[in-house]
Image (cartoon, rainbow, N blue to C red):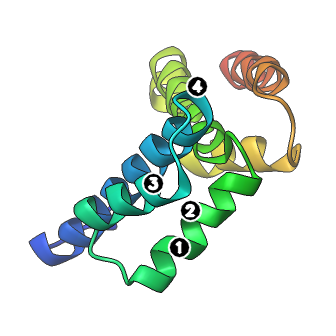
Amino acid sequence: MGFYKDPYSKFGQLTYEMWRAIRLVVDTGMHALGWSQQRAIDYFKTNAGKTEHDIIVEVDRYIVWPGQALAYKMGELKIKELRSRAEKTLGDKFDIRSFHDELLRHGAIPLGILETQVEAWIARQAAK
């Protein structure tokens, strides 16, 4: 979509990707591997340039909302998969704005239902 036109803006994007990866490790570390709050804080501190206060707030959020970072990542991967499928199937008929409208019009729904809805949208677009 042309958001990252220079190395500095790309650096920002990569920084946020790194933070999301750290959150995923912290979330699964605490809830799947039994990490303590302090271990999660230490991991975050070692791997991210955020303030200690921000790190503690984030770790506490993942303590009370297990699987949040994992759910975000799974959603991101599913949306990328659906976009790729739509682009491949529709070719020149693929419209990114229409695709995003389709994703958002349903609100918060399970990924399996979203996939069904997007597949139906792809079929409608292909039939036009």
| 33 lies left or right of 105 | left
One can see residue 95 in this view: no
Disc ID at residue 82: 4
**What is the CA distance from the residue labelled 3 to the residue labelled 1?**
9 Å
- How far from the left and from the top, in percent, is residue 31? 62, 36
Type of amino acid at the residue the image marks with label 1: Ile
User: In the image, is residue 24 above or below residue 115?
Assistant: below
> Which element carries disc 2, helix, strand or loop?
helix
Type of amino acid at the residue the image marks with label 4: Leu
- How far from the left and from the top, in percent, is residue 53? 49, 84
At x 74%, y 26%, the residue is: 118
Mark positioned earlier in the residue sequence (4 or 2): 2
User: In the image, is residue 78 above or below residue 67?
Assistant: above
Towards the viewer: 35 or 48: 35
Write down the residue under mark 2. Answer: 59
| Front: mark 3 or 4 | 3
Write down the residue under mark 3. Answer: 40
Label 2 near label 1: C-beta < 8 Å? yes
Write down the residue under mark 1. Answer: 56
**What is the CA distance from the residue labelled 4 to the residue labelled 2?**
31 Å
Label 2 near label 3: C-beta < 8 Å? yes
User: In the image, is residue 119 above or below residue 68?
Assistant: above
